[in-house]
Image (cartoon, rainbow, N blue to C red):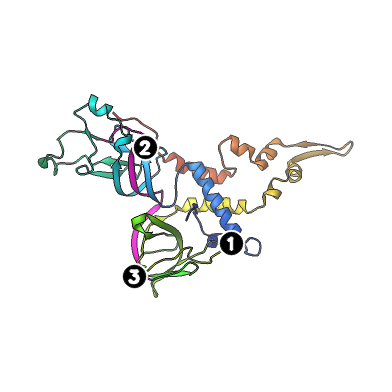
Amino acid sequence: MSYFEYITVLDIRNEGVSDTDYTDARVLECIRQASAKVNLYTDQWFQPVVGIYYLDGGDSPFLRFPEFKKFIEVSSIEILDSRTSRIKSKVFPTRRYFDETTNIYQISNCGRFIEFVTDVSGLTSSGNFDTGCKYLWPLGRQNIKVDGVFGWLEEKYLEATVTSAATAGDTSVEVDSVENWEVGDYAVFYLDPANNVVDIQIVTGVDSGTNTLSFEGDGTSGGIRFDVPLSTEIKTFGRVPLLIQYVTKRFTIKLLESLSSVLDPENIINNAIVSEKVDNYTYKLNASVITSSSGIDSLSQGGTGDSTADSILQRFVTQVPPVVGYI
């Protein structure tokens, strides 16, 4: 999945949008635009993003994304010496810095930070830790390489293994167990873990009788979007938050309207007329209707043009912690 998709075409069909009015390809395009709009407003990801990211060490015990995106799972962390400043360690030689062989870290603060475990009493006897020392991420620009899974989900963790290979276009894949899997879960396919080849689709059906997970296509293939080899590992880290799904549906249905009709000057002016005079034909316009119809007001105020969606997304924005400094 190269784009963010917070809902499926099937979700929009279930809202009454007919395939005779809008093709699957058109609906999918609008879903991707709507999901990108959610990302732009919140500065967050609401689907699992699997890969490697380079973060700034801040000479503090806490490591984070600049936008406080969430950590779900961390596979490995590496300090890149070529990008790391050694000034601090020379000025403060008693400080202790990250060492891949000895330091223990954990995801904390609702997934916003990676921090060092403070209780290291079990390790002090080995000499790896000095009692009372503060362990820090060394200062640097993109000097900390983090391999993991990132995103803001309604979290759950399940694994399954493919028991029968599937090809692109198949509507389902057979696995060893579908226990606790649900419609709406993100399925992360580890197609080639050694080369970090991963793909993602949203589960649209679960059959416990045949141990199969079903997937909706992208509007062209009609099913799974990629070949799935035998023994491929599939994981889920959860699903899109329910309110984000709702907002994405609202945006998608609005985006399905043709821009040529939404932004038609004649329609905008007709809708904005509040009074008319027949003699010499003059009319009075409501300026707020014009700015609202054209999207000018929402852009200037930092909104999305949908007050209901804005109020929901603002709730997610306010859950992001304020930027603070550490000594």
Number of dots carrying numbers: 3
Where does the image place residue 239, in percent across and percent down from the top left?
Answer: 42, 56
Q: Nearer the viewer, mark 1 or mark 2?
A: 2
In the image, the segment drawn in magenta is 136-163
Earlier sequence position, callout 1 versus callout 3? 1
Q: CA separation, marks 1 and 2? A: 40 Å
Residue at image position (50%, 68%) is: 169
Report the residue that reaches farthest toward the left.
125
Earlier sequence position, callout 1 versus callout 2? 1
Residue at image position (52%, 50%) is: 35
Please name whichever residue, 147 or 215, is drawn nearer the observer in this view of the structure: 147
Mark number displayed over residue 321: none
Name the residue that disc number 1 marks.
Answer: 24
Residue at image position (34%, 69%) is: 177
Earlier sequence position, callout 2 versus callout 3? 2
Image quarter where the C terminus lies is: top left
Name the residue that disc number 3 marks.
Answer: 176
Q: Is residue 217 left or right of residue 290?
A: left
